[in-house]
Image (cartoon, helix red, strand yellow):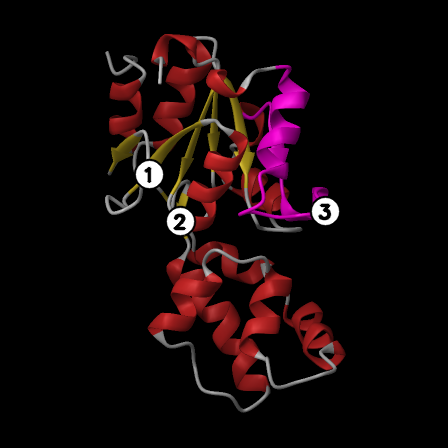
Amino acid sequence: MNISKIKAVIFDCDGVMFDTAVANRKYYDEVLQKFNKPKLNDVQFTNIHMMTVKAAIEYLFFEMDDLSEVYACLKNIGYHKFIDYMIMEKGFEDLLIKLKNRGYLIGIATNRTDTMEKILKDFHLDSYFDVVMTAAKVKMPKPDPEQLTLIMENLKLNPDEILFVGDSEYDGQAATAAKVGFAAFKNSGMKADFSVDSMEGIARILHINE
């Protein structure tokens, strides 16, 4: 892809902007515990990392026809108390500042639903983003390309003007379907235009690391 055409950088949240492994494990383990189910195993954790909460609950409680009790439990527990366990990726805010200073538009495409705004406020990042697209704002979450398509419409940009930074197969599939550039973050085994393992690596791709 032609990097000189890039006008916007879009980030996935979990595994890119933040290390959310501890927070997500604690959240889902508490839900599972309420129903006397064992804690997440590694395979389950890898799968739910990519999913919306709805998809994760359907996956974890596949044997239940009526999930209303589980959703009531989720509402009771809430995710907000787990935000403190999230760790911002090293160099992320510095990268956001560089992108803003160079005139790039910045967005988020995440399968989170109703927690993204609070996360941005709690970490004082909300002022950096031009568009935030969550699973709650689309009919079809990733791996469907709808989030990225709506971001392009919102920002009035073409696919070759977007670089999407993600870490999961869902992210890669969404990027491919939307025909945008894709940078695989800390996942070198994925098919991608670029593979990076740090925020500095993204800055190098865009030649803004001075």
Mark 2 crowd level (few <14, some 14–19, many ≥20, 10 Å Cα): many
C-alpha span from label 2 to label 3: 20 Å
From the viewer's side, name the closer residue of 176 and 31: 176
Percent position of residue 49, x then y: 45, 59
First in sequence, mark 2 or 1: give its number.
2
| First to last magenta residue range | 129-156
Q: Say which quarter of the image contains residue 158.
A: top right
Residue type beneath disc 3: Lys
Establish if 17 lies above or below 164.
Answer: below
Label 1, on which residue? 184
Q: Do tag 2 and tag 3 residues touch (Cβ < 8 Å)?
A: no
Mark 3 crowd level (few <14, some 14–19, many ≥20, 10 Å Cα): few
Q: Residue at x 37, y 77 (%)?
A: 41
* Residue 139 image label: 3
Residue 32 at least partly seen: yes
Is 141 included in the stretch rendered in magenta?
yes
* Residue 175 image label: none
Percent position of residue 39, x then y: 43, 81
Disc 1 element: strand
Q: Residue at x 25, y 16 (%)?
A: 209
Residue type beneath disc 1: Ala
Establish if 87 lies above or below 165.
Answer: below
Q: Say which quarter of the image contains residue 183.
A: top left
Percent position of residue 77, x then y: 63, 71
Q: Do tag 1 and tag 3 residues touch (Cβ < 8 Å)?
A: no
Disc 2 element: loop
C-alpha span from label 1 to label 3: 25 Å
Label 2, on which residue? 168
Question: Residue extending furthest bottom?
Answer: 36
Establish if 75 lies above or below 116.
Answer: below
Residue type beneath disc 2: Ser
